[in-house]
Image: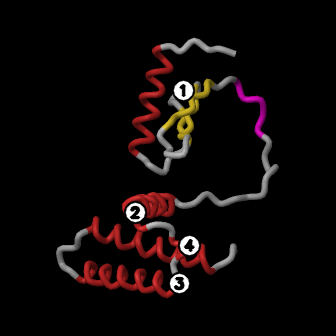
Amino acid sequence: MTVEVTKTHFRIIQLAAEEFDSDPTLTTWRDPHDAFIALRYGPERDSIYLYELGPAIAIFSGQLQEQPFPRQSLWMMAHYMEAQLQVNRHKGNWRKEHHEFLQREMERNSETLKYELSKEDKDKHEITIRCANIANYAMMIADNEGAPL
């Protein structure tokens, strides 16, 4: 089925792109009139799928096991963690690293964080970087040594 792409579609894509750019954790966006839904897509999360919505058929409640949606602060931390992983991509894969090395790096970042938090004129950007690095090292240890909860 072929759909003619109109100026409306381009306006909706523009609005969706602005929303996705303003919130890196956003994966789904609906236009204000509920006529379209846009999905962030792709391995680099830089593409948008656009769907035109039709009338709702029904709501089927209670069909799935309840899953809590992660809190906004958790989504943002995951974004910060991914950004720091990209910055440090040149270091290679953590799966070959011994847990003692990963723990030392986590502690080194923790000491830097402690120092930054003790300053009167805190560098909030540096605090976020250190927290993301600490979380990444904890994730690496869990990935290498842990098991699913």
Q: Residues within 10 Å of mark 3 (few under 14, many from 20)?
A: some
| Image quadrant in which the C terminus is located | bottom right
Q: Amino acid at mark 1?
A: His
Residue marked by disc 4: 95
Q: Earlier in the sequence, mark 2 or mark 1?
A: 1
Q: Which residue is mark 1?
A: 33
How far across and how far down the image is residue 140, in percent?
A: 53, 74
Say how the picture is coloured.
secondary structure
Q: Nearer the viewer, residue 125 or 43?
A: 43
The answer to if 58 sits in the magenta stretch is yes
Q: Earlier in the sequence, mark 3 or mark 2?
A: 2
Look at discs 4 and 1 and give the one toward the viewer.
Answer: 4
Comparing 17 with 42, the one in front is 42
Q: x%, y% of residue 67?
A: 69, 59
Please name the residue that numbered disc 2 is placed on.
90
In the rendered structure, which segment of residues is drawn in magenta?
55-59
The answer to whether mark 4 and mark 2 are in CB contact below 8 A is no
Distance CA(mark 4)–CA(mark 1): 47 Å
- The CA distance from mark 2 to mark 1 is 44 Å
Q: Residue at x 48, y 25 (%)?
A: 12
Which circle, 3 or 2, is nearer the viewer?
2
**Viewport quadrant of the N terminus:** top right
Which kind of residue does numbered mark 2 sit on?
His
Q: Which residue is mark 3?
A: 99
Residue at 40% x, 36% y: name it. Answer: 18
- Are there few (<14), some (14-19), or many (20+) residues within 10 Å of tag 1? few
Q: Residue furthest left?
A: 121
